[in-house]
Image: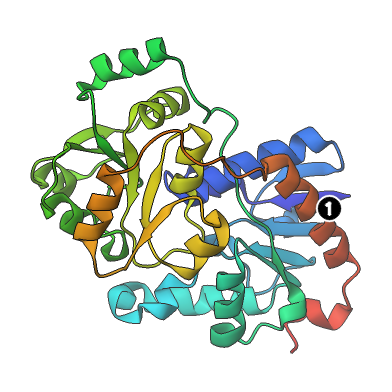
């Protein structure tokens, strides 16, 4: 099989980029087909096109199209995306025309069926995983990142994108919650993030540095009030670090009792849970990117055999 993969997504600094990079690498290592990195399948002789993000979905794909839908936040929180509403409307129309849609959780699958009327038999739930580099690190590596980023001996950790404020991540509210441990924020940071009170910013870090920062943290705190998967908690557990998160359907599904869950409206309780966390952390998720790649290949094979009317976007 020769298929096109929109690798532009791999440059995204958020979780979408992590997904695209890790999945593409695992697909390449599987050796099961030829990959052409492009978002213009019409110009290439390919059997299939996979857009691993919403921005690459095509209204009229010349070949069967698979789209990965990470969440439906812009539809569920329409008021926060008014300025980009038309763009999202067209992208979601393109997703409705995909032969198969990959989602990371059953929670997102339910949203896709309900909000986009995508038939359930066209949706495949394929989970994500921690990148291979994100594993428990040695004391020496942890000490090195403490020196490099001026981190305290004990700290709570938050990981994600900080270029622009994202209301569902609730970083600003988290920074204001009373706590006894310092809070370290990891991620490429915009100007607004540097104005947050009483936090330590690392800005962008390498995967090796991130693994050591995870390993050295007392706990990861994850205050999001809506998520399609929740990759940082999976990464933290892979590094042996406990997690405190808000009680969301996707997190319950993915983490399966491995983390302390607090009510969404109780950030004080979230901090208490994080500060009271103890090691050893629960065992990490066993699912790997190799598993995800194998499941994705199965979706590709199903897509190229799909009825021709599906490719026309007919319901």
Specify the quadrant of the image occupied by residue 183. Answer: top left
The residue nearer to you, when weighing 241 against 250, is 241
Specify the quadrant of the image occupied by residue 202. Answer: top left
Residue extending farthest top = 140
Q: Find residue 95 and report its horizontal and vertical position in percent.
A: 62, 73
- Residue found at x 51% / y 59%: 229
Q: Is residue 186 left or right of residue 298?
A: left
The residue nearer to you, when weighing 199 against 155, is 155
- Residue found at x 83% / y 53%: 45
Identify whether 315 is placed above or below 211.
Answer: below
Q: Is residue 163 left or right of residue 128?
A: left
Identify whether 144 is placed above or below 208.
Answer: above
How many residues crowd mark 1 within 10 Å: few (<14), some (14–19), many (20+)?
few
Q: Find residue 153 and report its horizontal and vertical position in percent.
A: 23, 23
Q: Is residue 35 left or right of residue 115?
A: right
Q: Find residue 13 and report its horizontal and vertical position in percent.
A: 42, 43
Identify whether 260 is placed above or below 152.
Answer: below
- Residue found at x 49% / y 40%: 237
Q: Find residue 118 and report its horizontal and vertical position in percent.
A: 66, 82
Look at the image and name its color scheme: rainbow
The residue nearer to you, when weighing 75 against 281, is 281
- Can you see residue 86? no
Mark 1 — residue? Answer: 45
Check disc 1 and report its element: helix, strand or loop.
Answer: loop
The residue nearer to you, when weighing 231 against 205, is 231
- Can you see residue 61? yes
Which of the image's four quarters has the C terminus? bottom right
- Number of callouts: 1
């Amino acid at each position: 099989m020769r298929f096109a993969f929109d690798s532009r997504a791999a440059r995204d600094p958020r979780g979408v980029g992590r997904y695209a990079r890790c999945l593409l690498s695992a697909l390449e290592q599987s050796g099961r087909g030829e990959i052409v990195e492009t978002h213009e399948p019409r110009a290439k002789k390919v059997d299939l096109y996979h857009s691993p993000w919403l921005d690459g979905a095509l209204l009229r794909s010349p070949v069967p199209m698979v789209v990965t839908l990470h969440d439906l936040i812009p539809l569920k929180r329409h008021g926060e995306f008014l300025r980009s509403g038309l763009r999202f409307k067209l992208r979601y129309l393109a997703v409705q025309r995909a032969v198969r849609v990959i989602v990371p959780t059953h929670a997102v699958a339910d949203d896709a069926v309900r909000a986009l009327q995508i038939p359930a038999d066209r949706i495949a739930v394929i989970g994500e995983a921690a990148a291979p580099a994100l594993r428990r690190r040695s004391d020496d590596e942890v000490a090195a990142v403490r020196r490099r980023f001026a981190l305290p001996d004990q700290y709570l950790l938050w990981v994600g994108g900080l270029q622009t404020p994202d209301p569902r991540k609730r970083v600003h509210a988290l920074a204001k919650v009373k706590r006894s441990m310092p809070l370290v924020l990891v991620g490429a940071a915009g100007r607004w993030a540097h104005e947050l009170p009483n936090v330590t910013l690392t800005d962008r870090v390498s995967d090796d540095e991130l693994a050591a920062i995870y390993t050295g943290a007392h706990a990861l705190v994850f205050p999001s009030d809506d998520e399609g998967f929740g990759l940082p908690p999976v990464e933290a557990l892979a590094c042996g670090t406990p997690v405190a998160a808000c009680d969301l359907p996707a997190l319950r599904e993915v983490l399966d009792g491995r983390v302390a869950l607090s009510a969404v409206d109780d950030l004080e309780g979230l901090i208490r849970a994080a500060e009271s966390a103890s090691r050893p952390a629960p065992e990490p998720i066993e699912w790997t990117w190799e598993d995800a790649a194998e499941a994705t290949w199965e979706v590709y094979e199903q897509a190229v055999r799909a009825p021709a009317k599906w490719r026309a976007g007919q319901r």
